[in-house]
Image (spheres, grey):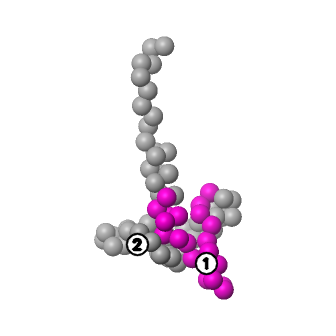
Amino acid sequence: MTDQAQSSPDSGLLRLAQVLTVIPISKSSWCAGVKAGIYPRPIKLGRISLWRSEDIHQFIATLDQESKPAVHGDIDG
């Protein structure tokens, strides 16, 4: 994939297909995660669901923080 396919704008609204280019999971997994409160909720415009780019970037940042191991001092106790 190119850098363009893996990035999203810093601001604005994204359609589901654009969200799934930066968060590579299936559409059904994404929708289930939204329903469960795991992923950001969309903004509804008529029948269209759109996500704020800022919400998606913030979600990715929290994933980055969770995946980093905690640094502890002495573990000898």
Q: Is residue 70 above or below residue 48?
A: above
Mark 1 residue type: Ser
Q: Which residue shows up at 62% across the image and 74% down it?
A: 43
- 20 left or right of 30 in image: left
Check if mark 1's residue and mark 2's residue have beta carbons within 8 Å.
no
User: Which of the 4 quarters of the picture holds residue 39?
Assistant: bottom right
Q: Position of residue 17 (x, y in %)?
A: 50, 76
Farthest residue toward the bottom? 46
Query: From this viewpoint, which residue is outermost toward the front?
Result: 11
Please give left or right for residue 47 compared with residue 24 in the image: right
Highlighted magenta segment, given as a residue range: 38-58
Image point 63% across, 61% down: which residue? 33
- Magenta span contains residue 75: no
The residue at the point 64 percent across, 78 percent down is: 44
Residue type at the position of mark 2: Pro
Q: Which mark is residue 19?
A: none
Tell which of 20 and 56 is nearer to you. Answer: 56
41 w.r.t. 12: above or below:
above
Which residue is the site of mark 2? 9
The residue located at (45%, 34%) in the rendering is 70
User: What number of labels is visible?
Assistant: 2
> From this viewpoint, which residue is outermost toward the right?
35
- Judge whether residue 50 is colored magenta: yes
Residue 23 seen: no
Spatial CA span between label 1 and label 2: 17 Å
Which marked residue is nearer to the observer: mark 1 or mark 2? 2
Residue under pointer 1: 49
**Image position, residue 4 (x, y; %):** 33, 73
